[in-house]
Amino acid sequence: MSLKDELETSVNDLLAAEWNRQDATTVPATDGVVLKNGAKDVDATYVYADLAGSTKLAQSTKDWAAAKIIRVYLSTATRILKANGGEIRSFDGDRVMAIFIGASKNTAAAKAGLQINWAIDNLIQPTLDAKWSSLSWKCDHGVGIDTGKAMIVRGGVRGDNDLVSVGSAPNIAAKLSGVRTSGKRVLISAAVYRLLHESAKLGGKAKTDMWTQLGTTSFGGKAVTYYGSNWRWSP
Amino acid sequence: MDDLLSRGIEIATQPWKTRAGWTVPESTDLALAKNEGVYLDATYLYADLGDSTKLAQACTAEDAGKVIRMFLSYASSCIKANGGAIRSFDGDRVMGIFVGKDQCGEAVRAALNLDYAVNILMDMFIEKSLPDVAAVWKTRHCTGIDRGQALLTRGGVRLDNDLVSIGLAPNLAAKLSDKRDFPYCTYVTSRVLNPLSYSDCQVDGDWIWRSVGEQVVGDAVVNLWKTEKWRKPA
């Protein structure tokens, strides 16, 4: 089939297909949603953990060194997200995405973010300092978290496709993970903040609020109030 | 916690086992545990749907789902039909890798085919069949392309990992796909432009590239070119 024909047929198929929509109480497996018209509705918390300054890293270091550093970050972030009950569903360059579902999803997600903060300062950076003392680049990251309803479908073509989450929460979480000007590493939407258990809201002996309200920004026409934290939680 | 510590040290200190590659590795070609990597001289293309946050908010999930799927299907088809390999999906964005002698030409052709698919076909289908979407949202996209040497390796942990491309080219291509400069929907670096044949630089006899000049893209200074032209798929 020529590309032209392929494009025309695919759209007709896409628009004509009735959605086969189901509620899901667990995060769908990668092969759990049908390409043709499958859709699983979830009420979930999305976390994006994104290594900061990767362009600078790629430019200032040998690629094999940059690769090690990116792998260390991804491996660490992935382990922490999973240990807190997150389901990993996407890797893209220096960024990993996890989906949390269930009664304490926001608390678990926020805790994971703060644990990655701890890991950067207490594991990753010290290891980099010891191994590459001349490396001026410092490891840092942005974590974005939002919660809400999403519809999980498949995108792509037969043989080359993957799960895609359609909804505000995954979108906002991704955008928050890319914010580098707030002074805080882990950013959560007000919706997430409101649902946090005390254990993930208050920290230290004095039980202070670990989260600072940072303001309200418009993302795609929607006003999102968000909070940030640089607290570190030891795993 | 010990787990984290030991794995981090392992990755950092283990020597690399790398080789030069000529074809784009499948996810299964590279082992996670050892520091295995493949060097590729490749052209990276990222195609990103614009304003998807607004789409998700202003339309029903079902309509938004159809639009996103349409875009991803088109982008994937255009990349594959022009010789590219799809290696990553991330939300409303797809990444393709092109290797070989004519990799820049192939990537540019894919981008221009996609421009037609999005701005002519997709726009028309949405107007006709998804009027609720057409009323509140405009179809916009951007394709970013750069070329260079990249190191492909696996990132993540056992059972949850994927191929990761490390290098300036995939990094820049991704950042270029974030540009929102309609009708200029294809952005390339001079590294991509320079090896192109004449036929890849013209549509209906017109030179298609406009110089953007030197710009800072995520800390790198690059020479950029853009085009608003499309090429109808054969």
Image (tube, coloured by chain):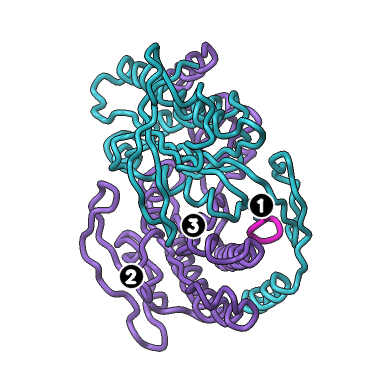
Chain colours: A cyan, B purple
Q: Is residue A52 left or right of residue A85?
A: left
* Coordinates of residue B88 in the picture (x, y in percent): 55, 50
Q: Residues within 10 Å of mark 3 (few under 14, many from 20)?
A: some
Q: Position of residue B147 (x, y in %)?
A: 38, 55
At 54% from the left and 32% from the top, the residue drawn is A109
Determine whether B1 is above or below A197 in the image: above
The chain holding disc 1 is A
Q: Nearer the viewer, residue B70 or B228?
A: B70
**In this picture, which residue range is highlighted in magenta?**
A151-160
- Which mark lies nearer to you, 2 or 3? 2
Q: Is residue A152 magenta?
A: yes
**Both marks 3 and 1 on one chain:** no
Q: Amino acid at mark 3?
A: Gly
User: Subunit of mark 3?
Assistant: B
Q: CA distance from mark 3 to mark 1?
A: 35 Å
Classify mark 2: helix, strand or loop.
strand
What element does badge 3 sit on?
loop
Q: What is the C-alpha distance between the residues marked 2 and 1?
A: 34 Å
Q: Amino acid at mark 2?
A: Lys
Secondary structure beneath disc 1? Answer: strand
Mark 2 and mark 3: span between their CA atoms? 23 Å
| Residue assigned mark 2 | B226
> Which residue is the site of mark 1?
A152
On screen, residue B126 versus residue A57, left or right, reads right
Observer able to see residue A31: yes
Q: Give the residue at x 50% y 24%.
A: A198
Q: Residues within 10 Å of mark 2 (few under 14, many from 20)?
A: many
Find residue B2 and report its horizontal and vertical position in percent: 52, 11
Q: Amino acid at mark 1?
A: Ile
Q: Given the image, what chain letter belongs to the residue carrying mark 2?
A: B
Q: Could you tell me residue B170's position as x and y percent?
A: 42, 49
The residue wearing badge 3 is B100
